[in-house]
Amino acid sequence: MRQMTMVGFLQAQNCTTLASAWRHPDARTDFTTAAYFQHIGQVLEAGKFQMGFFDDRLAMPDLYGGNPAEVVANGVRVVKMDPFACLMAMGFGTKHLGIGSTASTTYYEPFDVARRLQTTDLMLGGRAAWNVVTSVNDGEALNMGRDVHMEHDARYDRADEFMEIVLNCWDSWEDDALVVDKKSGLFAHPDKVHRQEYKGKYLKTSGTFTVPRSQQGHPVVIQAGSSPRGKIFSARWAETVFVAYHDIEDGKRQYKEFKDAIAGHGRNPDNVTVNTIAYPVVAETRSEAEDKMALIESLYKEVDGLSLLSEALNYDFKKKGMDEAFSPEELEGMSGMHAMRNRVMQQIGRNPTVRDFLNVTRRGRTHNAVVGSAKDIADQLEQWFTERACDGFVIAGTHTPGTFEDFVKFVVPELQRRGVYQKEYKGTTLRENLGLGMPERGWWK
Ligand SMILES: Cc1cc2nc3c(=O)[nH]c(=O)nc-3n(C[C@H](O)[C@H](O)[C@H](O)COP(=O)(O)O)c2cc1C
């Protein structure tokens, strides 16, 4: 029987994707410690999550008003630690959980990313994954020594080249290249370690990769592009996909289109799981869950929404009055997440205002939170899953570790009882737990 995948949405920062999460009375404040990440990992593992993954952005959202003071004072996603270090801490506190980290194709070098991930994968016994992002804004560009963030579609063209180099790196060592035979003196088969010569429009490399294959071949590739160009990239490269479908009908339509696009690349759509974001707020009874939700909503501040909109769309929302409409040129100049901008324009049907952006995107607030008892939440997840609006869920926290603890305590047993979610891990590597085989060298060609 088909089973859901479950992914924990993790942050190496002071809050969840909800900036207000740190204000929650039950939120832990030791988010700079290994103990904090190990606890979360252990909770996810007790709930048999296939994976947790760390999101990342290479800047705090201080484009808003051109000054960090307001976001720092309000804790709007301002602490952002290195996700790989947090991943390792979590990995050493768990045994089965797959763990992913985000790394940007716009600001890093492919050799570095390939090496860091492949090493991580070896250290965790084949449990690592990479969330491939092209990054979103000028804050990231400036921190990384560039003047402006690259244009949207060109980022994905560069990312295609980046992937070819990374995959070439991961293919460099054949599965049985390493010998380490002291008697014969043969360390590794020289005919099974391959050199790479690559020259693209944006990137080039020339050399031999330095890390052997891992227990699962190489890390699992995750992607979450949602613009037309982003989806083409995703359909070509992703082994598991993160999406934010807005309702079940929209989900079913987009899910089918996306699976068809994967097949269009000559790949098997069943091998690529599509996981949509869910914000569960669960308690013993529905009315208790509604009380919890009311508390969560009360923690939101307008600066959360405005600074996170500025970050996502790479546009300073402080430049405009709340009810002032954006001009076509201003809308065109938003070079961050196009899919978000386009959705606002479509839903509003005229030039949107700042307030329209806040209302449609609900940036800084939960979007389509699922609030209720274990049965309520399981009903909804099961319906999305069985009607093929997704293959699984990215569980996002309203606060941590509370959201994950509640989900594992209340919802997981109910899903397991219904037979739609695993009771035990299927294997030891992330690929085994996602039902993916060992990747053949060159599968992507
Ligand atoms: C669950 C999920 C997680 C994401 N994590 C990140 C992240 O860590 N860093 C990032 O820059 N973008 C992240 N994104 C954004 C996507 O990579 C992508 O940029 C976005 O969906 C807009 O699509 P586009 O790039 O095709 O315009 C995430 C998206 C989703 C749905």
Image: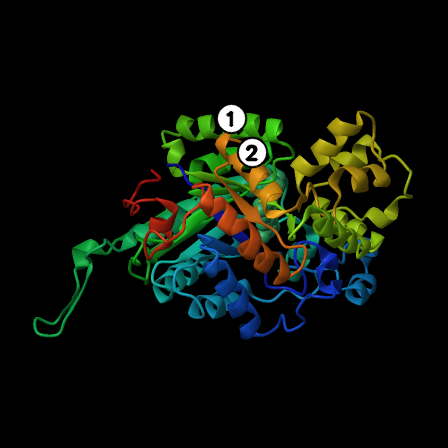
361 is higher (above) or lower (below) than 197? above
Q: CA distance from mark 2 to mark 1?
A: 14 Å
**Residue 178: percent from the left, percent from the top?**
20, 62
**Residue 298: percent from the left, percent from the top?**
81, 54
- Residue at x 37% of width, y 67% of height: 123
Local crowd size for mark 2, using a 10 Å CA cut-off: few (<14), some (14–19), many (≥20): some
- Residue at x 74% of width, y 66% of height: 25
70 is higher (above) or lower (below) than 443? below
Local crowd size for mark 1, using a 10 Å CA cut-off: few (<14), some (14–19), many (≥20): few
Q: Secondary structure at mark 1?
A: helix
* Quarter in which the N terminus is drawn: top left
Residue 81 falls left or right of residue 66: left
The residue under label 2 is 229
Of circles 2 and 1, the one toward us is 1
Q: Which residue is nearer to you in this view: 338 or 329? A: 338
- Residue kind at label 1, given as amino acid type: Glu
**Can residue 163 be spotted in the picture?**
yes
Can you tell which mark lies on residue 257?
1
**Residue 129: percent from the left, percent from the top?**
44, 54
Q: Which residue is nearer to you in this view: 165 or 50? A: 50
* Quarter in which the C terminus is drawn: top left
Q: How is the image coloured?
A: rainbow
Can you tell which mark lies on residue 422?
none
Residue 384 falls left or right of residue 330: left
Tell whether circle 2 marks a residue whose Cβ is less than 8 angstroms from ligand 1. yes
The earlier-in-sequence mark between 2 and 1 is: 2
